[in-house]
Amino acid sequence: MTVSAVRMRMRHEGRLDFGEYGLGGSVSTSSDVYSYGIILMETFTRTKPTDEMLAGGMTLRLWVKESLLNGMTKVVDMALRRQEGETSTRDVQCLTSIMELALECTKESAEERD
């Protein structure tokens, strides 16, 4: 999929523009911070912002944010757990901290991320 096709799809679905990823011609510290947050979410959930399950106004950021309230282990990649189905309190605290950092990095306002 080309960059322009992805941009059109993202705009059509009401998601943030890929300009945040540095593809819009303007690279900045806040776009790097945003990208880092997205990469953290992608890594720990094994879900991309363009995943089909994130349709109808749902974004990766919103999905992760809601998961913090409803049980972080539901969105975290199963391969990251120690044993199938088991997650310790320490694991949950660590994953929650990582996802909170990712959410801070992906705030809508660039000024809030610096």
Image: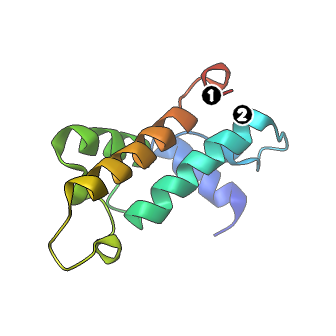
Q: Is residue 30 above or below residue 80?
A: above
Q: CA distance from mark 1 to mark 2?
A: 6 Å
- The answer to which of marks 1 and 2 sits earlier in the sequence is 2
Task: Give the SS element for disc 1.
Answer: helix
Marks 1 and 2: CB-CB under 8 Å? yes
Visible residue check, residue 48: no
Q: Is residue 59 left or right of residue 6?
A: left
95 with respect to 73 (left or right): right
Q: In the image shown, does 68 or 56 lie closer to the viewer?
A: 68
Q: Residues within 10 Å of mark 1 (few under 14, many from 20)?
A: some
Numbered badge on residue 30: 2
Amino acid under label 1? Arg
Instruction: Identify the residue shown where x is 21% and y is 79%.
Output: 83
Q: Label 2: how many residues lie within 10 Å, few (<14), some (14-19) or many (20+)?
A: many
> Which residue in the structure is indicated by mark 1?
113
Residue 105 in view, yes or no: yes
Q: Residue at x 20, y 64 (%)?
A: 87
The kind of residue on which mark 2 rests is Ser
Q: Helix or strand or loop: what does disc 2 sit on?
A: helix
| Quadrant (top left, top right, bottom left, bottom right) of the N terminus | bottom right
In the image, what residue occupies the spot 21% across and 37% down? 69
Point out the image quarter for the C terminus.
top right
Percent of width and height locating residue 65:
33, 39
49 to the left or right of 73: right
Please indicate whether residue 49 sits to the left or right of residue 111 in the image.
Answer: left
